[in-house]
Image (spheres, rainbow, N blue to C red):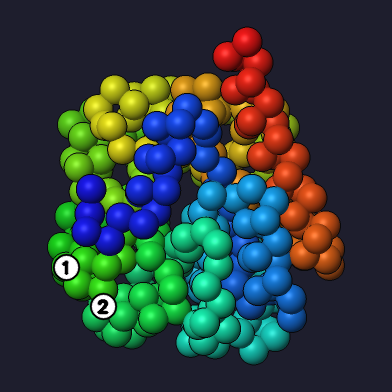
Amino acid sequence: MSENAQIESVLQKKMDNGKKALVVYITGGLGDDWIQTMHSVIDAGADVVEIGIPFSDPVMDGPIIQMANESSMKSGSTPVSILSDLRGENPAAPLAAMTYYNLAYRMGHERFASGLSSAGISGCILPDLPLEELDAWSDSALKSKIETILLAAPTTPDARLAEICERSYGFVYAVGLLGVTGVRSELADSAIKIASRLKKVTSKPVLVGVGIGNPEQAVKASEVSDGVIVGSAVVQEMLDGSSPEKVGELVSTFRNALDKNLSLIHI
């Protein structure tokens, strides 16, 4: 476990207590009340909040999150303003930033990592940063006590899965399906398979993201993983202009479903 294992320790405690983790993604700078939305989803049961820092070419993101990125940037939000908004908020759950490597590269690894840390962020996801090029960023991240969360795709070979797990901190992000983020009508079989493969090679928390669009899918994915990441469904609520409280109500449906399923299992 890393020295700055805030996310990992929170999720590990959840696992030790026999519960499933819920990570919620929101787009930074989306709406004047996005900070209140962050607090609301935590109050509703999110164990970790993933803050999307908008980027002009989000290769992993589907239409909903792309639209949210564009809306945030059009309103004047920047990486600097988003991090500034977060300073001093002291949320009741750890935060992870999700953005793209070009942003970290342009700002400089040390400056970017330090900026995340000073904003109260303890984890970072850079989905387009290859494992082979991880070292330079990882060294700077560790100096600022930022946990680098790595992704594992359904097509990743077993040998590479083990290396990803070894070098990932916070949790291992099991990508539920090939393609971009978004809400799907059914949970992909690949989500179950990648989570099962990862659980065989690591004791770190394994969470399934991409394609988790409703509570039923969250429950199904969590049966073979340690929890789920919910993004597009929540961001759609934000795009629709829903209040922080209304977004929190949606998150509560995921939290309640995960907890209820565990109660049924233990009866």
Marks 1 and 2 close (CB-CB < 8 Å): yes
Q: Considering only order in the chain, which callout, 2 or 1, is on the residue closer to the N terminus?
A: 2
Q: Distance from label 1 to label 2 (Cα)?
A: 9 Å
Where residue 82 sits in the image (x, y, percent)? 55, 81
22 vs 98, left or right, is: right
Quarter of the C terminus within the rendering: top right
128 vs 160, left or right, is: right
Residue at which label 1 appears: 139
* SS category of the residue bearing label 1: helix
Residue at x 79%, y 50% (from the top left corner): 249
Amino acid identity at mark 2? His
Q: Quick check: 80 above or below 253?
A: below
Q: Quick check: 15 above or below 3?
A: above
Residue at x 43%, y 69% (from the top left corner): 121
Amino acid identity at mark 1? Asp
159 vs 39, left or right, is: left
Residue 188 vs residue 87, the one in the foreground: 87
* SS category of the residue bearing label 2: helix
Residue at which label 2 appears: 109
